Image (cartoon, rainbow, N blue to C red):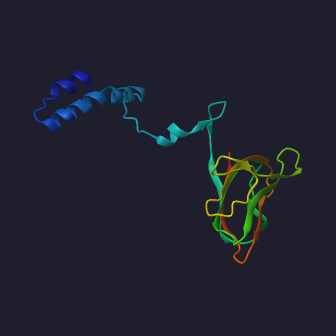
Amino acid sequence: MQIKNVIGKLKPTGVFQRGACIVLFLLLPVLLMAQSRSGGRPEAWNWANRLSLTNADQSPAVLYEFTEADLTNQSAPVTQTTLCTPAATGRFRISAYLKVTTPATTSSTLGAVTLKWTDGTDSVAQSITMTMSTPAGGVTGSSAGNSTASVLNGSSYIYASSSAISYTIGYTSSGATAMVYEAHFTCEEF
């Protein structure tokens, strides 16, 4: 359908019809461009394609969630725990969010979070302490805030083999009431 045919058929009589005609008039060039780019077929809007990343060769870069772990009502350190075991060697982003849900009576320290994996190139065991951010914008490995406003979050990028990727969480608490916290982890493969 050509633009002049559409405009020639518009005979607005009421306020609503005039408004609809104005909207159609403003959208018509966009619709026609989409139609011409798709060889005359209407082009469906695909948000996934618009938001996707591409590799250097313009092939799609797929980012998907590999696994997650949600720990609640924790009142002790977490010893080495497997977060994910990759099917193949690759790049991974490990994200962590820790928050005090009940402060200790006297004092407490939440963190550090330590990641362990086997390197994807030379198969050497690796271990790092995650760098975490605080609500005030600070960078740390642990928090001695001892309040429900005590939050740590951070991400680490690793290149791992198909061996387990694991984490530990440090914890100290003193006083009659022990500090309680929650921890949420995500392992994403690129």
Q: Is residue 91 visible?
A: no
Identify the residue at image location x=69%, y=72%.
Answer: 105
Identify the residue at image location x=84%, y=48%.
Answer: 119
Residue reaching furthest bottom?
176
Residue 99, given in percent of the width and then of the height, sits at 65, 61
Report whether 127 appears left or right of 186. Answer: right
Nearer the observer, 12 or 127:
127
Report whether 93 appears left or right of 58. Answer: right
Identify the residue at image location x=75%, y=70%.
Answer: 173
Residue 93, given in percent of the width and then of the height, sits at 70, 48
Residue reaching furthest front?
106
Nearer the observer, 168 or 19:
168
Residue reaching furthest top?
4
Q: Is residue 85 visible?
A: yes
Report whether 3 appears left or right of 86. Answer: left
Kindly indicate the quadrant of the structure image that contains residue 162. bottom right
Can you say which quadrant of the picture contains the N terminus?
top left
Q: How many marks?
A: 0
Nearer the observer, 163 or 132:
132
Can you say which quadrant of the picture contains the C terminus?
top right
Q: Is residue 31 above or below residue 118?
A: above
Residue 92, given in percent of the width and then of the height, sits at 72, 48
Identify the residue at image location x=75%, y=63%.
Answer: 109
Residue 90, given in percent of the width and then of the height, sits at 75, 46
